[in-house]
Amino acid sequence: MPLRTRRRRHAAMTGLLALATAAALAIAPPAAAADTWTEVGSDRARPLTESQGLTSVEVPADSPNRYTGIGTIPPDVALRGWNHVGDPDASYDGHYIEPYQRDSGSAKMFRVQAPDGSWAEYVHALGPGEALNNSWVAVSPDGQWMLAGEYGTMSRLLVFPTPGVNPATSPSADLPHVATVHLDRPVRDVQGCDFSGPTTLLCSSDDPAGTLFGMTKPLLQVDLSGAPSGTADVSGRVTALRQLPLRSGCSGAFEAQGVDYDRRTGTLRVIVMSPGFCVLTDSMTYRFTRG
């Protein structure tokens, strides 16, 4: 076949392929749009008792919101080395869960309060390559699975059976890491996540560099490919929604902390601690509603 003829056929085939691709894209279902969140108010965040995390509690009815900070760590827990508490969460049947870490060792701990007021501790031995940090927990809407996060630049979230809720858990046995959420892009210094739907997470990032999403301290949305379970990994698509508010009478480094989504009111709350001396005076829990 002459060279010129082969070139004409190649060009024709390329054109047909382009048309077919365009047609396929035209009929493909669009990706789910990320939510937009508008700031609607703020409340003062106390640095000792409201500086790490927060959660709304649905059961029993009219329960107050819960907060964590260095001042909420019980003395006996701190004496055993658990000197950092992260962003907590509550299951929809009223179990309240706090994540703990310590400066050294090979485990992390989840402290659980049952609806009857009793407390229990569930310890997880670190797996190969698992970071010591225990920054936050988020209980799935069905109550059976709990996601937890590591600090630093990470491309995954960890899935555990929810301690005290999932019948496979016991304070006398190791709490196993049963599955992983594989993120489509890395995230940095995530301080809190909460479910806003069966397969959607909202997360606060304390990222100081801004190189991953073009902004520092972003509010992130993670759309999961399926509901978490203990039998299979799922993937997560990460989207940066907006920068968290960074307002203070002092200049310096802000610290984004925990996040809570209250499904009863549709209100999202995020703690941002102010820099320097102003951590005492104008640190805030910001409130947002979906736009």
Image (spheres, rainbow, N blue to C red):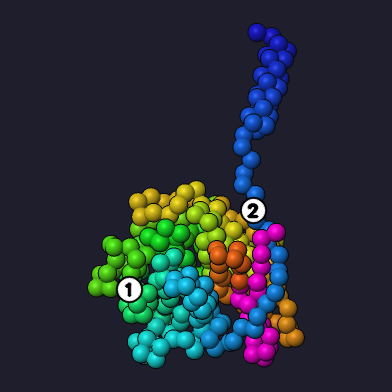
Q: Position of residue 251 (x, y in %)?
A: 73, 83
Q: Quadrant of residue 277?
A: bottom right
The N terminus lies in which quarter of the figure? top right
Q: Is residue 6 above or below residue 268?
A: above
Q: Which residue is mark 1?
A: 122
Which span is picked out in magenta? Answer: 270-291
Residue at (55% x, 69% y) in the render? 260
Report the amino acid beneath label 2.
Ala
Which secondary structure lies at badge 1?
strand
Q: Quadrant of residue 267?
A: bottom right
Q: Is residue 250 magenta?
A: no
Q: Is residue 56 at all visible to an observer of this figure?
A: yes
Local packing at callout 1 (Cα closer than 10 Å; few below 14, some 14-19, many 20+) is many
Q: CA distance from mark 1 to mark 2?
A: 35 Å
Which of 258 and 191 lies nearest the eye of the viewer?
258
Q: Position of residue 200 (x, y in %)?
A: 54, 56
Q: Position of residue 246 (x, y in %)?
A: 71, 75
Q: Position of residue 190 (x, y in %)?
A: 55, 68
Q: Which residue is mark 2?
A: 34
Give left or right: position of 195 versus 208: left
